[in-house]
Image (cartoon, coloured by chain):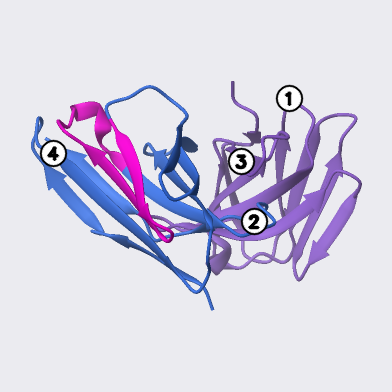
């Protein structure tokens, strides 16, 4: 069964606005990761948050994790046109190195 | 630094033809290796993973197979392609921490 589910499926914003994407999962995890994929390219790791962490920052990225609700959010502040991409959450689900990816959120940032 | 290569970048094959996609990793040893398929506009489906030479785990029953003849080489194969095999195939590796996965550029396969 699908572990990670992103919401919304698609998001369109203006440059300079903030973008928030959400991810829900079903089973216990050791960590949750967010990846970015530009159209037709491989995925690039953005940030990893462990199950005992509640919030993590990396540049313009802010990730939160609520293990009681089995959910995470990715906030991109002051978005740029170059942030246009699909964003995926992935959980390990205690599966020893295997990740389960959600369906992704397609973000479009208009200049 | 570590790099991961996939080839070919794109491939158009007729139904019933064989397939061989290759993935190689440089700059690391004994990586875990993964093959994913991504349908258009969808998430990633894990097809195979390998923790060592000759060790392959299959995640879903399908028309594909995988092999790991060398430590840093992972091959995805099929004897007879189906239309449903079309998609974007991604190879990835992890190091000893088995946490962050690093992806190759992908191979776009179109079966006609």
Is residue B76 magenta-colored? Answer: yes
Is residue A56 magenta-colored? Answer: no
Q: Pick whichever, A37 or B28, lies toward us.
A: B28
Q: Residues within 10 Å of mark 2 (few under 14, many from 20)?
A: many
Same chain, labels 4 and 1: no
Q: Which residues are magenta?
A: B64-87
The residue to which callout 4 is attached is: B18
Label 3 and label 1: CA atoms lie apart by: 13 Å
Examine the rendering and report whether any part of residue A41 can be seen: yes
Q: Chain of mark 4?
A: B
Same chain, labels 2 and 3: no
Same chain, labels 2 and 4: yes
Colour in which the image shows chain A:
purple
The part of the image, by quadrant, that contains residue A96 is top right
- Quadrant that contains the C terminus of chain B: top left
Please tell me which of labels 2 and 4 falls first in the chain.
4
Please tell me whether residue B46 is drawn above or below residue A58 in the rendered image. above
Label 4 and label 1: CA atoms lie apart by: 38 Å
Colour in which the image shows chain B:
blue
Examine the rendering and report whether any part of residue A111 can be seen: no
The residue to which callout 3 is attached is: A99
Label 2 and label 3: CA atoms lie apart by: 9 Å
- Quadrant that contains the N terminus of chain B: bottom right
Q: Residues within 10 Å of mark 3 (few under 14, many from 20)?
A: many
Residue A45 percent across, percent down from the top left: 61, 59
The residue to which callout 1 is attached is: A26
């Amino acid at each position: 069964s699908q572990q990670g589910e992103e919401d919304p499926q698609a998001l369109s914003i203006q440059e300079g606005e903030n973008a928030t994407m959400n991810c829900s999962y079903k089973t216990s995890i050791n960590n949750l990761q967010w990846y970015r994929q530009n159209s037709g390219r491989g995925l690039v790791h953005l940030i990893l948050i462990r199950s005992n962490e509640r919030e993590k920052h990396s540049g313009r990225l802010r990730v939160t994790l609520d293990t009681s609700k089995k959910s995470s959010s990715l906030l991109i502040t002051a978005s740029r046109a170059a942030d246009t991409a699909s964003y995926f959450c992935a959980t390990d689900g205690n599966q020893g190195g295997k990740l389960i990816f959600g369906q992704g959120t397609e973000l479009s940032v208009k200049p | 630094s570590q790099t991961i290569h996939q080839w070919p970048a794109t491939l158009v094959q007729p139904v019933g033809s064989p397939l061989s996609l290759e993935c190689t990793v440089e700059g690391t040893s004994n990586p875990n290796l993964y093959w994913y398929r991504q349908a258009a506009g969808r998430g990633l489906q894990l097809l195979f993973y390998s923790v060592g030479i000759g060790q392959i785990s299959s995640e879903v029953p399908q028309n594909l197979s995988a092999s790991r003849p060398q430590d840093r080489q992972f091959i995805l194969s099929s004897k007879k392609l189906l239309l449903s095999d079309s998609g974007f195939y991604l190879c990835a590796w992890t190091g000893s921490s088995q946490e962050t996965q690093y992806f190759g550029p992908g191979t776009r396969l179109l079966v006609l």
